[in-house]
Image (tube, rainbow, N blue to C red):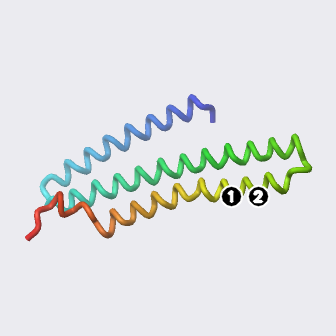
């Protein structure tokens, strides 16, 4: 897939998500504020996870390509390059794990619901 095709797919997915969110929020208008907050939380968490996963995948692929290129140029340093690459991949993957953790906190702990839905 070329860069132009990837950009078009990303733009199309963004438009679909935007209109889907509006339709979901319009359907939730008759329900209580807490269920609307939950729908918005789920959509936001899912969208954040998609962006973080894509960013992590792009970063990991670029790191692997660079490491393989460096090993191809200097095979004697393959061990050191491989160790540095694995550490870098672990740090890149931590981005997606942190976003997943934040999304789960928003889904289940709902720390902002007291600002949205008035308490009893």
Residue 111 image position (x, y, % from top left): 27, 64
Residue drawn 86% across the image and 43% down it: 72
Please say if 67 is above or below 95.
above
State left or right for residue 5 relative to residue 116: right
Determine whether label 1 and label 2 are within 8 Å by CB. Answer: yes
Residue 37 falls in image quadrant: bottom left
Label 1: which secondary element: helix
How crowded pointer 1 is (Cα within 10 Å; few <14, some 14-19, many 20+) is rated as: few
Q: Where is residue 59 in the image (x, y as percent from the top left)?
A: 61, 46
Q: Position of residue 115 (x, y in %)?
A: 18, 59
Residue sticking out furthest to the top: 4
Q: Residue at x 63, y 59 (%)?
A: 90
Quarter of the figure that contains the N terminus:
top right
Name the quadrant of the C terminus.
bottom left
Q: Which residue is drawn at 68% across and 58% down?
A: 87
Name the one closer to the observer, 119 or 30.
119
- From the top left corner, tell me how far across and down residue 40 is, in percent: 28, 54
Q: In this orientation, which residue lies closer to the viewer: 111 or 5?
A: 111
Is 42 rendered above or below residue 70? below
Q: Is residue 39 left or right of residue 68?
A: left
Instruction: Look at 32% across and 45% down and name the residue there.
Output: 20
* Mark 1 and mark 2: Cα distance apart in space: 6 Å
**Helix, strand or loop under label 2:** helix
Find residue 87 and name its label. 1
| Residue situated furthest right in the rendering | 76
Q: Can you identify the residue that label 2 sits on?
A: 83
Q: Is 60 drawn above or below residue 31 in the view shown?
A: above
């Amino acid at each position: 897939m070329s860069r132009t095709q990837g950009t078009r797919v990303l733009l199309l997915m963004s438009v679909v998500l935007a209109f889907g969110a509006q339709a979901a929020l319009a359907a939730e208008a008759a329900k209580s504020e807490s269920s609307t907050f939950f729908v918005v939380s789920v959509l936001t968490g899912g969208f954040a996870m998609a962006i973080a996963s894509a960013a992590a995948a792009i970063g990991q692929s670029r790191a692997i390509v660079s490491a393989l290129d460096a090993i191809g140029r200097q095979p004697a340093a393959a061990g050191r390059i491989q160790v540095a690459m694995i550490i870098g991949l672990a740090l890149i993957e931590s981005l997606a794990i942190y976003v997943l953790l934040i999304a789960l906190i928003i889904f289940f702990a709902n720390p902002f619901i007291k600002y949205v839905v008035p308490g009893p």
